[in-house]
Image (cartoon, grey):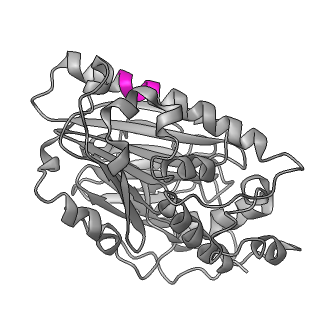
Amino acid sequence: MITTPINNGPASTQKIHTPNLDKKISLFDPSSQLKAMPALWYTDRDIYEAERLSVFGHNWLAVGHTGEVANPLSYFSLEVADESVVVVRDNDYKLKAFSNVCRHRATQLLTDTQGTLATNMMKCQYHGWCYDLAGHLRKAPELGPVPGFTREDHSLVPFEVESWDPLVFVRMKPGNEALQDTLKPIIESIKDRNLSSLKWGGRKEYEVACNWKVYVDNYLDGGYHVPTVHPELAKALNYSKYRTDIFDRSSLQHAPTQTAGDAASAARQGSDAMYWWIYPNLMINIYQDVMDTNIVLPMGTDKCKVIFDFYFSDKWNQTTIDSYIASSHQVQLEDMKVCEQVQHGLKSQFYTSGPYAKRETGEKQFHELLANDLKKTL
């Protein structure tokens, strides 16, 4: 189910005017099969700032799950590419999302990652400014008369917010594409899987010492790294039949499963493993009666956070749930190791870029979408 977003006014036309940014962006030719994105795109601060405005400013971003804001006055907050975001459930059970920054001195408004408001107000702990659940400024202690000041001009900056089944999405700046249009391929593909009946069963968070794009690249390489990096997972998948389907702003990697090599891999069961990626930062891994979602959040040029949430059917008991999460954790540790090695190698003066392997069609699509967004910042 997708809820209705709020309207937060005309789209921003903010651009970046950094010397040589156009030259840096032009280093990558999306039409080339020979060269993938250049190393500089994974290490350069100007590119990162351009991504903050374009990729993470104008697209629908997965930020959490509805269980975090199940009741009125419940909220969660997080950092998305250096932007502080808060999502709150109002008394009418409607989701609201705002820039989590007080309009007085830019203090982070709600500092806990998750909680429940004591009143119908969001209060800044610095100077006591208070905002209602619509983001309107209601209290500014001792402000006094300020020429030209209006409370209306100092409301919290609202973001568009929608939910789809367990996932919550925000868009910081208005756009034309509806969330349902972005999600249409996955909605159609899982309509017979009854995933809405799955219940949240746990979360793990990781900070990875690599650029967020390195992590996404690794996910989208068409299983290229699975035999070498994930030997136990490889036993559970029919690698020879692993394939990638490309859609407008998403892709699906899938492979039949086979008899697993150990109990941990056996937790990934079912006739078909589905690995969905939704541009730019969401991954959804679907097996039989179980699903996990991975949200990737940039934390600078060489660090990212990955949030894993796990969902299970009633067929799963705590022992099998623990086994599945442990198996996922092992795969994540293996991915972290190789991603951090890649980030280190990207700093080499002797590396610029490499070709796409035939399996890496999803990775190439990601690069093309990213390049298109970056060009909009010029």
Q: Is residue 279 left or right of residue 346?
A: left
Q: Is residue 300 left or right of residue 140?
A: right
Q: Does 108 sit above or below residue 229?
A: below
Q: Quadrant of the C terminus?
A: bottom right
Q: Is residue 123 left or right of residue 166?
A: right
Which residue is at the front of the view, 287 or 203? Answer: 287
Q: Residue 111 location in percent, x, y?
A: 54, 38
Q: Residue 205 location in percent, x, y?
A: 48, 32
Which residue is at the front of the view, 141 or 305? Answer: 305
Which residue is at the front of the view, 305 or 145? Answer: 305
Q: Which residues are magenta?
A: 326-330
Q: Residue at x 46, y 79 (%)?
A: 175
Which residue is at the front of the view, 222 or 159? Answer: 222
Q: Residue at x 81, y 72 (%)?
A: 21
Residue farthest along the front direction in this orientation: 240
Q: Residue at x 21, y 57 (%)?
A: 92
Q: Residue at x 58, y 72 (%)?
A: 368
Q: Residue 22 location in percent, x, y?
A: 80, 77
Q: Does 207 sit above or below residue 165?
A: above
Residue 216 falls within the magenta-colored stretch: no
Q: Quadrant of the N terminus?
A: bottom left
Q: Is residue 251 visible?
A: yes
Q: Residue 144 location in percent, x, y?
A: 65, 61
